[in-house]
Image (cartoon, helix red, strand yellow):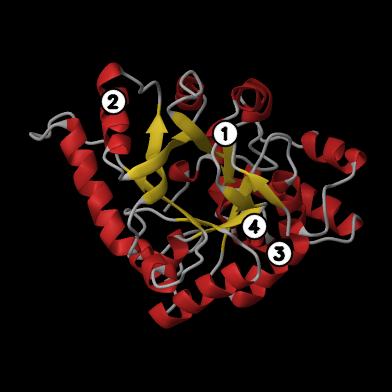
């Protein structure tokens, strides 16, 4: 396993990290049910034993936070546990800082932690930074609830807004994969220049960039066609489509850790072995980048048929 320091933080993270949404709620193509609680806890501990030291969770991921807390709460040595907080609705009666603090204290309880090493504002779209928010985040750090703040984003406006404040937002988590490469030129060099940690998610595009692409809805035919072209490249190179997808993302410039999600130990081990195969050769990277989906809306799973 390769380990990197997450941007300007002091958090050492493995080159691949484990997302936990599918452990706490139905998720992905087919909305498969999560595994039983004891299996999920065992899987989390197996990942840590295998060297995966970055665990991604959120209050909105069903009972994911509770599972992570049960898996690691009593351990002296823990992985880096990154959770999230939602910005409250403008119509809420309580103040911004108060609402955020309530969520943070709930996460501390569920995760069985004394303080939160990394908390990310969850699923931000569009410009969002203002003086009130910055003051609230600084005050919550001063209270000892949070060590580092980050942001998980969609699109380009939100991450570009966040990177203007590297002293506050130390980590950005963004979607990135072989078909959705829009951020690698407009954002990644700026993050590296500012010392902002980069976490990649959706590297398998919720199963499209795996053998499950064969079951895609007919309305997603352009996605299926592109996935087939990538699968052909993978086969020619002696890999599966999922292996190609993980290695492409995990060794992209500027990245610190790349998230994968699974409910199976066999997939956990396969992802670790795939990462340890190293970066892809330049000619294969060029061939991947030549494959595009012209309808960008299809790259957002929120636009897919249910």
Mark 1 and mark 2 residues within 8 Å of each other at the beta carbon: no
Estimate the spatial distance between the alpha carbons at disc 4 and disc 2, rounded to whole Å.
41 Å
C-alpha separation, residue under disc 3 versus residue under disc 2: 38 Å
Q: Residues within 10 Å of mark 4 (few under 14, many from 20)?
A: many
Mark 4, residue position: 213
Q: Is residue 89 visible?
A: no
Residue indicated by mark 1: 8
In 3D space, how far apart are the residues under numbered discs 1 and 4 (Cα atoms)? 37 Å
The answer to whether residue 227 of the structure is visible from this angle is: yes
Q: Is residue 73 left or right of residue 222?
A: left
Q: Earlier in the sequence, mark 4 or mark 3?
A: 4
Q: Residues within 10 Å of mark 2 (few under 14, many from 20)?
A: some
Q: Decide if residue 134 is on the left or right side of residue 202.
A: left
Residue depicted at x 59% and y 23%:
194
Say whether disc 3 or disc 2 marks the residue closer to the N-terminus.
2
Mark 1 and mark 4 lie on one chain; the one further toward the N terminus is 1
- At numbered mark 1, what does the secondary structure look like: helix, strand or loop? loop
Going by the image, does 105 lie left or right of 225?
left
Q: Give residue 132's position: percent from left, percent from top.
A: 25, 21
Q: How far apart are the two marked residues, 1 and 2, measured between alpha carbons?
A: 21 Å
Query: Quadrant of the rendered structure where residue 65 is?
Result: bottom left
3 vs 2, front mark: 2
Which labelled disc corresponds to residue 133? Answer: 2
> Are discs 4 and 3 less than 8 Å apart at CB?
no
- Please tell me whether mark 2 sits on a helix, a strand or a loop: helix
Say whether disc 1 or disc 2 marks the residue closer to the N-terminus.
1
Q: Which mark is residue 272?
A: 3
């Amino acid at each position: 396993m390769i380990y990197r320091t997450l941007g300007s933080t002091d958090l050492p993270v493995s080159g691949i990290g484990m997302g936990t949404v599918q452990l706490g709620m139905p998720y992905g193509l087919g909305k498969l049910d999560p595994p039983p609680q004891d299996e999920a806890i065992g899987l989390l501990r197996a990942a840590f034993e295998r060297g995966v030291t970055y665990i991604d969770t959120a209050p909105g991921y069903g009972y994911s936070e509770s599972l992570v807390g049960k898996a690691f709460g009593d351990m002296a040595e823990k992985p880096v546990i990154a959770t999230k907080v939602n910005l409250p609705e403008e119509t809420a009666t309580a103040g911004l800082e108060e609402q955020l603090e309530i969520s943070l204290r709930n996460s501390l309880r569920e995760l069985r932690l004394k303080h939160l090493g990394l908390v990310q504002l969850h699923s931000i779209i569009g410009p969002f930074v203002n003086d009130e928010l910055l003051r609230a985040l600084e005050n919550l750090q001063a209270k000892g609830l949070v060590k580092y703040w980050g942001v998980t984003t969609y699109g380009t406006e939100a991450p570009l807004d966040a990177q203007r404040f590297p002293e506050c937002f130390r980590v950005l988590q963004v979607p990135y994969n072989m078909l959705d490469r829009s951020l690698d030129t407009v954002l990644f060099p700026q993050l590296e220049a500012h010392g902002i940690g980069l976490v990649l998610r959706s590297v398998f595009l919720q199963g499209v960039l795996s053998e499950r692409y064969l079951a895609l809805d007919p309305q997603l035919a352009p996605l299926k066609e592109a996935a087939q072209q990538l699968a052909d490249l993978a086969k020619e190179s002696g890999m599966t489509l999922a292996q190609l997808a993980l290695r492409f993302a995990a060794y992209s410039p500027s990245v610190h850790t790349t998230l994968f999600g699974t409910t199976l130990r066999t997939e956990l081990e396969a992802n670790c072995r795939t990462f340890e195969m190293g970066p892809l050769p330049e000619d294969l990277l060029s061939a991947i980048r030549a494959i595009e989906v012209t309808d960008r809306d299809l790259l957002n799973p929120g636009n897919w048929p249910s």
